[in-house]
Amino acid sequence: MDARELSLLLDTASDGIIVINRDHIITVFNPAASSILNIPAERALGAPVEEVIPVTRLPAVLESGESETDRRLTFGSVNIVTNRYALRDSDGVIYGAAAVFRDITELQRLAEEITNLREIRLLNDAIFESTQDAISVVDEAGNGVLVNAAYTRVTGLRQDEVVGKPCTVDIASGESIHMAVLRTGQPVRNRRLRVGPYRRDVMVDANPIVVDGQIRGSVAVIKDVSELRRLHDQLADARATIRKLEARYTFDDVVGEEPVFLEAVRRARVAAGTPATVLLHGESGTGKELFAHAIHNASERRNARFLRVNCAALSESVLESELFGYVGGAFTGARRDGRRGLFEEAHGGTIFLDEIGLMSLNTQGKLLRVLQEHEVRRVGGNDAIPIDVRVIAATNLDLAAQIADGAFREDLYYRLLVVPVSIPPLRERPADVPLLVEQLLAKINAEYGRAVRAVEPVALDVLSRHRWPGNVRELENVLRRAVVAMGVEETEVGLEHLPALAAGDGGCEDEERADGAAGPGSAPSADASPTEDSASLKPLDSVVARAEAEHIRRALSACDGSRTRCAAVLGVSLRTLQYKLKRHGIV
């Protein structure tokens, strides 16, 4: 190759070429090198290479004689890949070094862009396939382009049955949403359709795909309405179950200050801190279920289920199947796949067996096994199913007498009697009546939308002296009837609002004595003055209230203002005294 051809080759080469001699002087610096490095050729030629390109390694190659290939170099803002060679004469003597390089800045940018696009595509594909909603994409002609996995699940159509086919292929009933979007160029919202071979009921949203102002297709998101309906039903059932199983009350709702009642609360609190079985005993209406709720909510099982079973409300066979469950085909009408019992449902939680004294002997035997072995056997089955359930039982019967009569198993009785809690009747805790009245009025106000503040002192005195054979339940019933009888503008329950209280065994002793003091046929008292002017007489409740207020003032003064001592002198609880002080405006 002559000098002219070599010069032409160097001038037209797209790669930069630099050659230095033994003295490190640049002897060749072609136009491509000048363009890539942005250095004029006239400044480079004849100059030491280190002055022109400070980062060069050509002197090192010149000295070592070792070639360097595919080396990366950054010169200013330019990224270069270069090959460096030692130049030898025919005798193998090194007389110079050459570098052949090219600008890869744009290639790197494109490569990074391609990599980013690839990552974005992979991310989009992952999102596209992982979404639970079905997605369908068609082109401007309405032919299927892309569907995700959820689309196959919802419609029952495979990808190869849709892609490349008209978008109407999946429509079982209704108009294609894709065609509506392509025709109008407008989004479509909440359109109901039936799709696929199973005519699945779906809700569809679709939007046009616009590129450079042109509609290039349509994308639709398909929601399975039947699945949503199933989930809605499951949620409704779960909410109903939660309401049914929720333990609503805590020990903050257990109101009372009488020592005999406080002892019952203390034992219940102790029981709550253990996994032991609890037996609640008390008359009907004393609040046994309230105690059961409070014990569960104060225990480590508070976040697990609480189930209540009224043993007196179900027949023996029904109670057994409810408590222990049954296997498929155990009896006529049984579900084919069987059913879990309430002991299994309450696993990890608490089951409250109310009215346990009325449970049949046969069921008692099965309950005893649950308490002893911590396992259940379903009706009709032989497999033992381990359970972890805390049992709270309640009764208003004398179980010892039931045992003597052969109506209750003695071994079960002692299994239940691990922590006995006896709840006193309301007649044994009269000082708690004002506290209960205050609590119950707040509850009734919330339920009835009323604003009843209190009970007048005379009416409260009558309520406190009543024997309450129905206990707290009867008290609540009386207050509800009183509130209903009040005018909407009235805010205090008076004697005129109270219904007639039950007498007989639970009647008010003071009233009985007052009614019978004179006896049938007795003459009027000699002190009575039938001619006295009735206009000068005041209502009885105001006279009694005034007398009560004056008596409290004298007692408070005698006790040097100590409310605790005053309550002890008057024979009432401190809370009752505070209620009366507030009622009469005594500071």
Image: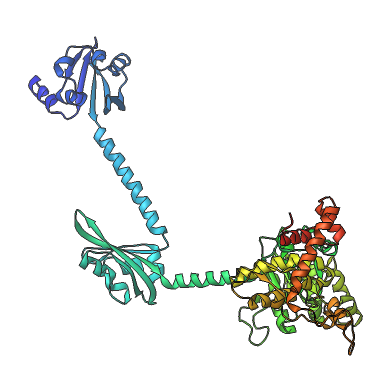
Quarter the C terminus occupies:
bottom right
Colour scheme in use:
rainbow
Left or right side of 46 for 172 = right
Q: Look at 25% across and 17% down and name the residue there.
A: 53
Residue 89 visible in the shown view = no
Nearer to us in this view, 329 or 415 = 415
| Residue at the extreme bottom | 521
Q: In which quarter of the image is residue 311?
A: bottom right
Nearer to us in this view, 545 or 464 = 545
Left or right side of 579 for 157 = left
Nearer to us in this view, 74 or 487 = 487
Residue 175 position within the rendered picture, expressed as x and y whole percent measured from the top left: 28, 75
Residue 132 visible in the shown view = yes
Left or right side of 318 for 235 = left
Q: Look at 60% across and 72% down and name the residue there.
A: 448
Nearer to us in this view, 179 or 375 = 179
Q: Look at 84% across and 50% down and name the residue there.
A: 560
| Residue at the extreme top | 23
Residue 487 position within the rendered picture, expressed as x and y whole percent measured from the top left: 61, 75
The total of numbered circles placed on residues is 0
